[in-house]
């Protein structure tokens, strides 16, 4: 457990190396949200992508991943730390986007067309979830160079369709409790399967 915590901290230390890039993304996201309130959904996706995807890209370019091979760390722990890092950042962006939404409402900067705090939070979670269980595995196994086209497609896809998906789910005439349980089970099962497949493939990559 201590190794995993240290690995997660190592992920966050990478943020300092790309802080100018992240500041730029956050600034653009905030400015666009002020001028177009409905841009908050896309802005949340941009920040989530910056924290998760861009950090992983920097680590590969700087050869930081090779440092892991020289440490007494199991490959499965390294992969698990990546997943934890992804979900922590997703929750962080959900919190920040929720605060921004409420501040803009208090300042009467709006209104938000067909957007609620719940829909923004769900969309942000969906974007972070897809990046964590699909984009990161491709980046870890294939690398950003070999898997560039697939990775870019998987990054853009959830950002573009997150809002539409949430609206579609909301339009389905199903008990909210059942919907919540179904989504929760889907998230847990998908995450576990993704982690198991990724960690096993990463071990083979590590051995080779």
Image: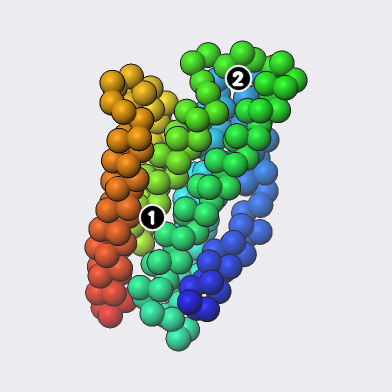
> Residue 149: x, y in percent?
32, 44
Residue at numbered disc 2: 37
In the rendered image of this protein, does residue 171 appear above or below residue 43? above
Q: Which of the labelled discs sits on residue 136, or is there none?
A: 1
Distance from label 2 to label 1 (Cα)?
30 Å
Does residue 147 appear in the picture of this structure?
A: no
Residue 114 showing in the rendered view: yes
Report the quarter where the C terminus lies: bottom left
Q: Measured from the top left, where is residue 167 in percent x and y? A: 38, 22
- Whether residue 196 sits left or right of residue 26 in the image: it is left
Label 1 CA crowd tier, 10 Å (few <14, some 14–19, many 20+): many
Q: Position of residue 49 (x, y in %)?
A: 49, 44
Secondary structure beneath dot 1 equals helix
Between circles 2 and 1, the one closer to the viewer is 2
Q: Quadrant of residue 31?
A: top right
Residue at the limit of the structure toward the right, as seen here? 107
Earlier-in-chain disc, 2 versus 1:
2
In the picture, measured across the screen, residue 181 lies left or right of residue 106, that is: left
- Residue at 27% x, 65% y is 196
Q: Residue at x 25, y 74 (%)?
A: 204
């Amino acid at each position: 457990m201590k190794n995993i915590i240290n690995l997660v901290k190592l992920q966050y230390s990478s943020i300092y190396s790309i802080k100018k890039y992240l500041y730029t993304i956050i600034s653009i996201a905030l400015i666009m949200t002020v001028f177009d309130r409905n841009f908050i959904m896309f802005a949340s996706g941009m920040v989530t992508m910056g924290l998760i995807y861009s950090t992983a890209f920097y680590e590969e370019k700087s050869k930081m991943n090779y440092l892991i091979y020289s440490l007494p760390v199991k490959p499965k722990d390294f992969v698990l730390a990546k997943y934890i890092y992804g979900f922590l950042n997703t929750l962080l962006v959900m919190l920040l986007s929720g605060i921004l939404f409420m501040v803009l409402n208090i300042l009467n900067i709006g209104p938000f067309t067909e957007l609620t705090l719940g829909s923004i939070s769900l969309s942000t979670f969906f974007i972070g979830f897809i990046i964590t269980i699909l984009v990161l595995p491709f980046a870890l196994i294939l690398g950003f160079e070999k898997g560039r086209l697939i990775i870019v497609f998987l990054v853009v896809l959830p950002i573009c369709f997150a809002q539409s998906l949430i609206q579609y789910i909301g339009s389905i005439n199903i008990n909210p409790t059942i919907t919540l349980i179904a989504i929760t089970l889907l998230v847990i099962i998908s995450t576990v399967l993704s982690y198991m497949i990724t960690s096993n493939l990463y071990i083979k990559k590590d051995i080779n």
